[in-house]
């Protein structure tokens, strides 16, 4: 059976031009190399070289084998290099699951410098884990979960990356726009716009309306943040969103944040990951960078050193 060692022999003899030089390159004695060549030719049932004085010349079969060696060996060597980088946490695809609809804009600010710092690590963002992020982590479908609602389970760890306040966002011409805060009963006549998330996962319901026994007049679901806030700005409804996101959009839309209750609703964004992945450099550095990049300039976020720059590795 043809083996990698046979291909290496054919390539080195051709490169070095003699058995002695090839044996040195392969860390073999000349007699061991000669024996390996005879064994290869016996196994193939055909000659690979012809002797011409002190030189070896490849036969037609040998020329074909050399072409195979020149194609296959670089691929195997590159594969070993890449696998070594995986083992050292220097290469891979960082798969991120999102349980936070409005966090996508913040995530983009993290991904850009991260890709620059880790040229051998790709990033893939999956937004279909709003209802099963924990299962996706346990099932090895994602490596990081962005969530405001961590579920503490054995085998997982959750790292807080920044704090924020959930606020009511209304149009600037809305009757509630001038208030310092609102109470649940004041939303009884409103159209509440939210992402397509079950009520039991929406803070505006679980932490504000339901404990007070109140409900909005209507509940409308919209998938995209841009359309949701356009609707709010045009007076078609109100929404509950992170304060940092409202501040970002308020620069271009007629929006006004209002505190939910006298004390507000304090929240955090967490990055969840498997404990078994502790110590993987490119995961740890993503967490460090996520803490260093606030949702909006000058807002929230914990300070942390940016990820260590990594030299780009050359593929063979």
Image (spheres, rainbow, N blue to C red):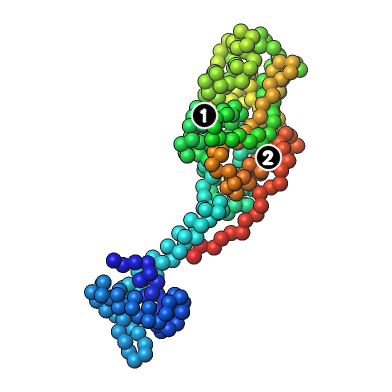
Q: Residue at x 54, y 32 (%)?
A: 154
Q: Position of residue 225 (x, y in %)?
A: 59, 29
Question: Gap between marks 1 and 2, in whole Å?
Answer: 22 Å
Q: Count neighbours of disc 1 (C-alpha within 10 A) and say few if under 14, some if 14 to 19, many if 20 or more.
A: many
Position of residue 189 measured from the top left corner of the image (x, y, whole percent):
62, 9
Q: Give the image quarter of residue 159.
A: top right
Q: Secondary structure at mark 2?
A: helix
Q: Residues within 10 Å of mark 2 (few under 14, many from 20)?
A: many
Q: Is residue 292 visible?
A: yes
Earlier along the polypeptide chain: callout 1 or callout 2? 1
Mark 1 residue element = loop
Residue that numbered label 1 is attached to: 130
Q: Residue at x 63, y 52 (%)?
A: 117
| Image-based side of 178 in relation to 137, left or right | right
Q: Which residue is mark 2?
A: 291
Give the residue displayed 52% in from the left and 29% down from the top: 130
Percent across and percent down for residue 125 are 53, 40
Q: Position of residue 92 (x, y in %)?
A: 52, 50
In terms of depth relative to the viewer, which is nearer, 284 or 192? 284
Compared with 185, 12 (above or below) is below
The residue furthest bottom is: 53
Looking at the image, can residue 253 be seen?
A: no
Residue drawn at x 34%, y 75% as measured from the top left: 36
Image-based side of 103 in relation to 130, left or right: right
Residue lying furthest left in this view? 45
Hey, which quadrant is residue 104 in on the image? top right
Whether 174 is drawn above or below 287: the answer is: above
């Amino acid at each position: 059976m043809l083996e990698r060692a046979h291909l290496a022999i054919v390539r080195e003899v051709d490169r070095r031009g003699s058995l002695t030089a090839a044996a040195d390159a392969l860390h073999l004695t000349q007699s061991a190399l000669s024996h390996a060549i005879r064994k290869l030719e016996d196994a193939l049932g055909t000659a690979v070289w012809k002797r011409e004085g002190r030189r070896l010349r490849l036969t037609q079969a040998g020329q074909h084998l050399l072409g195979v060696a020149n194609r296959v060996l670089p691929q195997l060597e590159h594969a070993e290099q890449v696998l070594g980088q995986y083992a050292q946490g220097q290469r891979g695809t960082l798969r991120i699951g999102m349980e936070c609809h409005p966090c996508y804009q913040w995530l983009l600010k993290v991904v850009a410098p991260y890709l620059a710092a880790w040229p051998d690590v790709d990033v893939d963002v999956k937004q279909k884990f709003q209802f099963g992020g924990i299962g996706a982590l346990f099932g090895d479908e994602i490596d990081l979960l962005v969530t405001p609602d961590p579920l503490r389970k054995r085998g997982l760890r959750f790292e807080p990356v920044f704090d924020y306040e959930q606020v009511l966002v209304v149009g600037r011409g809305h009757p509630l726009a001038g208030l310092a805060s609102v109470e649940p009963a004041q939303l009884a006549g409103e159209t509440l716009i939210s992402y397509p998330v079950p009520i039991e996962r929406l803070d505006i319901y679980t932490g504000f309306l339901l404990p007070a026994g109140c409900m909005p007049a209507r509940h409308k679901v919209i998938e995209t943040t841009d359309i949701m806030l356009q609707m709010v700005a045009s007076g078609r409804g109100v929404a509950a969103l992170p304060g940092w996101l409202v501040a970002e959009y308020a620069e271009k839309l007629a929006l006004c944040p209002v505190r939910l209750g006298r004390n507000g609703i304090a929240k955090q964004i967490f990055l969840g990951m498997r404990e078994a992945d502790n110590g993987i450099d490119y995961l740890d550095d993503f967490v460090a960078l996520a803490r260093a990049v606030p949702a909006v300039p000058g807002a929230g976020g914990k300070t942390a050193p940016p990820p260590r720059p990594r030299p780009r590795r050359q593929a063979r």
